[in-house]
Amino acid sequence: MVTIDARFLEFVSENRTMVLKLNKALYGCVIAAKLWYDMLRSTLEGLGFTRSAYDMCVFSRNSEQGHTVLTVHLDDVKIFPPGDSERSE
């Protein structure tokens, strides 16, 4: 059995079940990845990046310094700054 923290006892129903609304997604939940991506996309677009029309995990931005590309895989982001030699290989 599981011990319920006394602070939550008032939320336990007569049949000993409890339903709670989460204020944010838990890591590992199906929706957590979508919410993380939406937040990342919003942040990147706020910084002037544009999502690729062909791949939703590629973002790019043109600036005075040159063309910057970001790629996203799960929770990893790889940045190719202007003049990056790896990009031209």
Image (cartoon, rainbow, N blue to C red):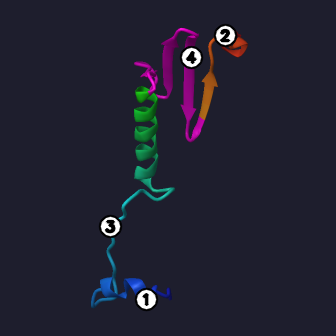
Mark 2 closeness class: few <14, some 14–19, many ≥20 residues within 10 Å: few
Q: Is residue 33 above or below residue 41?
A: below
Which stretch did the figure color magenta?
47-76
Q: CA distance from mark 3 to mark 1?
A: 18 Å
Quarter-of-image position of residue 79:
top right
Q: Which disc number belongs to residue 68?
A: 4
Q: CA distance from mark 3 to mark 4?
A: 40 Å
Mark 4 closeness class: few <14, some 14–19, many ≥20 residues within 10 Å: some
Q: CA distance from mark 4 to mark 2?
A: 9 Å
Task: Please check the rendered image and state whether residue 69 is part of the magenta-colored stretch, yes or no.
Answer: yes
Left or right: where 65 falls relative to 52:
right
Q: Which residue is mark 3?
A: 21
Residue nearest the observer in this picture, 17 or 63: 63
Q: Which disc number belongs to residue 83?
A: 2
Q: Is residue 30 above or below residue 85?
A: below
Question: In the rendered image, which quarter contains the C terminus?
Answer: top right
Mark 3 closeness class: few <14, some 14–19, many ≥20 residues within 10 Å: few
Q: Earlier in the sequence, mark 3 or mark 1?
A: 1
Quarter-of-image position of residue 85:
top right
Give the label, 2 or 3, closer to the camera: 2
Identified by mark 4, the residue type is Thr
Left or right: where 76 falls relative to 60:
right
Q: Secondary structure at mark 3?
A: loop
Q: Secondary structure at mark 1?
A: helix
Task: Please check the rendered image and state whether residue 85 is part of the magenta-colored stretch, yes or no.
Answer: no
Q: CA distance from mark 2 to mark 3?
A: 48 Å
Q: Is residue 40 above or below residue 5?
A: above
